[in-house]
Image (cartoon, rainbow, N blue to C red):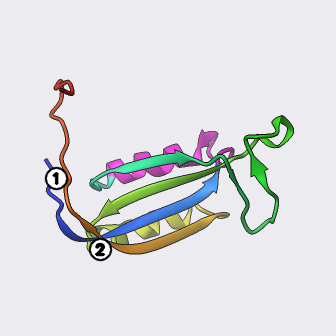
Amino acid sequence: MTRLTGAALRLTVLVGENDTWHHRPLYSEIVHRAHAAGLAGASVFRGIEGFGASSLIHTSRLLSLSEDLPVAIVIVDTEERIRAFLPRLDELVTEGLVTLDPCEVIRYTGRTAGETPA
């Protein structure tokens, strides 16, 4: 089990929901590569509204504009491990935003395989 407490780095990748990598959702490819790299964890959050460099507003409120909503992939691990992962993003993220923020991990725990929540 990975232990992570104290100073860490948060990697956030903002892309469109419809962005793909070899016919697979880009966000899924990033999560799977983070997993393969042994990073502590990754989560994908689907936005309900947003715009980026194209200045087109995407929103879930209007059916005609509900396509290609923003998604954020958030990964937290040590600075060394996050920075080592960045080259793997270079070929994947051709449009979007990648940010790094220092953060402090207060608690990082998980369930063991087969364990159910209380």
In the image, 91 versus 82, the foreground residue is: 82
Q: Amino acid at mark 1?
A: Thr
In the image, 50 versus 22, the foreground residue is: 50
The residue at which mark 2 appears reads as: 79
Q: Position of residue 68 (x, y in %)?
A: 72, 45
- Disc 1, SS: loop
Q: Is the residue 41 above or below the residue 104 in the image?
A: above
The residue at which mark 1 appears reads as: 2
Residue at 48% of width from left, 63% of height from top?
A: 12
Residue at 82% of width from left, 59% of height from top?
A: 56
Magenta stretch contains residue 24? yes
Magenta stretch contains residue 56? no
In the image, 32 versus 7, the foreground residue is: 7
Q: Viewed as shown, does residue 13 lie left or right of 43? A: right
Q: Viewed as shown, does residue 117 lie left or right of 92? A: left
- Disc 2, SS: helix
Task: Please give the range of residues in magenta.
Answer: 17-36
Q: Position of residue 33 (x, y in %)?
A: 41, 51
Residue at 73% of width from left, 60% of height from top?
A: 51
Residue at 75% of width from left, 47% of height from top?
A: 59
Q: Position of residue 103 (x, y in %)?
A: 32, 71
